[in-house]
Image (spheres, helix red, strand yellow):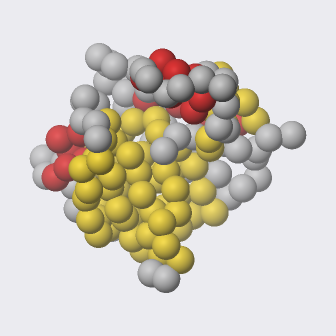
Amino acid sequence: MRAVRDADTFKDALSLLASPLTLVTTADEAGRRWGLTAGSVTSASLSPPLVTVGIALTSSCAAAFAAASGFVVNVLGEQHQELARRFATTGIDRFAGQALATWPGSRLPFVPDAHAAFHCTVEDRLRVGDHDLLVGRPTEVLLDGSSRPLLWHRRAFRTAT
């Protein structure tokens, strides 16, 4: 057994938790698109339906999500490995050359061939340690599910078999 005394030990333990990968996207008032790769998305409630997304305060997208009234959670399939890598990279235009669409009736970008996509309105924000938890209410969902999900486990991309 190892005591959790530092961030590295905590990260080592968390790396053993397989997480579905998502691309979380939004747009600001000026129409600029923002997005990041996240493994920290979870269902928070069934009645009403709510999801939570963890956004690191150090993320280049933190301010955009802090001001957003809506966002999309795109559940990635195995074919989205390069997209997940791109949106986890700092210092680049993550949307450049990417085939993301705009959710009908909104400015929000989404992945048209995502495993699933949840269009959410922001219900609440909570500061928890070095993250903001964004609580969203799904208002619409796209379902595909024809591919295997993209997972993050032991600091590498995986798929379910």
* Left or right: residue 76 compared with residue 42: right
- In-front residue for pair 94/155: 155
Looking at the image, which residue is at 35% across and 62% down? 135
Q: Is residue 97 above or below residue 66?
A: above
Q: Is residue 20 above or below residue 119?
A: above
Whether residue 15 can be seen here: no
Q: Residue furthest right?
A: 161
Q: Residue 16, position in %: x, y?
A: 67, 31
Whether residue 137 can be seen here: yes
- In-front residue for pair 98/47: 47
Looking at the image, which residue is at 86% across and 40% down? 161
Q: Residue 115, position in %: x, y?
A: 64, 51
Looking at the image, which residue is at 48% across and 66% down? 44
Q: Is residue 125 above or below residue 64?
A: below
Q: Residue furthest bottom?
A: 47
Number of marks present in the image shown: 0
* Left or right: residue 29 compared with residue 121: left
Residue 15 occupies which quadrant of the picture? top right
* Left or right: residue 24 compared with residue 21: left
Q: Residue 120, position in %: x, y?
A: 38, 65
Residue 60 occupies which quadrant of the picture? top left
Looking at the image, which residue is at 66% across and 26% down? 1
Q: Residue 110, position in %: x, y?
A: 45, 50
